[in-house]
Image (cartoon, rainbow, N blue to C red):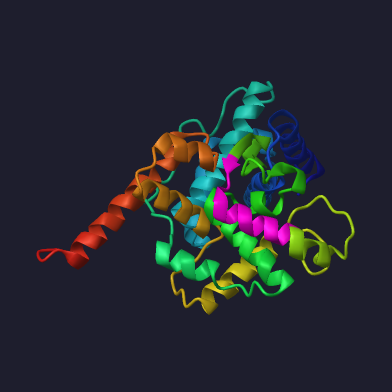
Amino acid sequence: MSTVNRQLIDQFCDSLWLEEGLSQNTLDSYRRDLIQFQNWLDNQHPTVLLNQVKAEQIEAWLSFLFLSKHSSARSSARALSSLRRYYRRAVRDGVMSADPTLNIDSPKLPRSLPNSLSEAQVEELLNAPNVKTELGLRDRAMLELLYASGLRVSELVGLTLARVSFDTGVVRVFGKGSKERLVPMGMEANDWCQRYVNEARPQLLKHRPHETLFINHRQEPMTRQGFWYLIKQYAKKAGIMTPLSPHTLRHAFATHLVNHGADLRVVQLLLGHADISTTQIYTHVARERLRQIHEQHHPRG
């Protein structure tokens, strides 16, 4: 990739971080898509810079993704979204006179319902850790808090002790775009987290100070990958065969709230969704569950 194009991509990501405070994961995703597009340009149109692209070249790239790399509609849509973000900013900053993505339609995405767990399966998962050990007590506290609050895994492992109020039963979370929200943790999660802080955390840290709430056996903050590995192990131990994702307990949290009559706006606030349309997927999940129950138990289902 040319030095000029590398600088253009770096400047774009830096401006997003400075102006919007986007997370490193989001910035890495934008950077990855733009580098992939530029690498394709270098092969197909080696004299064309990123800021000289035409609509037909973007369409050819999307076709290449779909045909050559067997990219899903969702992956193609995300890649196009990254380009839209880049070129809208380029037009805004006067670097380009027109947005080449303006008249390109996004791929139609099939409505997919998030994987979730039944309330019985969640109970099995929560009971899987051996709470007689420090690590098991930590894992039980993490699982309880994740399910009780609907946090993203990245938000959970990023919690500091100062952001947890055991007196009020509330955690202060910084989500996407560094947006802050207060989320209740519930009595059960509160109790388990207090037990972890009082009984296990000092032993894991060997009584050394550390601001991060959840610590691994190396006295370092728990990582997303490390915690996700643990969830899969506990799901296997609990006999849960449902395909899991890093958001499974977050989806279960929202689905169970909606199933029990929670207002969608409240669920939106708890999840930290910027748009209510993102939260509305859980009404479809609830309807799908009702349909399955009807089919299973009604004599004419």
Residue 301 visible in the snapshot: yes
Residue 64 visible in the snapshot: no
Q: Is residue 191 magenta?
A: yes
Residue range of the region highlighted in magenta in the rendering: 183-197
Outermost residue toward the left in this view: 300
Corner quadrant of residue 131: bottom right
Q: Main secondary structure of the magenta part?
A: helix
Residue at 75%, 59% (x, y): give it.
Answer: 198
Please give the count of numbered marks on the rendered protein.
0
Along the line of sight, the residue nearer the viewer: 246 or 70: 246
Q: What is the x, y in percent for residue 172?
A: 66, 40
Residue at 75%, 53% (x, y): give it.
Answer: 213
Q: Is residue 225 left or right of residue 117?
A: right
Residue at 46%, 41% (x, y): give it.
Answer: 267
In the displayed structure, 100 sits above or below 237; it is above
Q: Is residue 244 left or right of residue 108?
A: right
Q: Is residue 210 left or right of residue 172?
A: right
In the displayed structure, 28 sits above or below 120; it is above
Q: What is the x, y in percent for residue 258?
A: 38, 46
Q: What is the x, y in percent for residue 97?
A: 61, 22
Along the line of sight, the residue nearer the viewer: 273 or 95: 273
Along the line of sight, the residue nearer the viewer: 121 or 281: 121
Q: Is residue 233 magenta?
A: no
Q: Is residue 128 left or right of residue 106?
A: right
The C terminus: image quadrant: bottom left
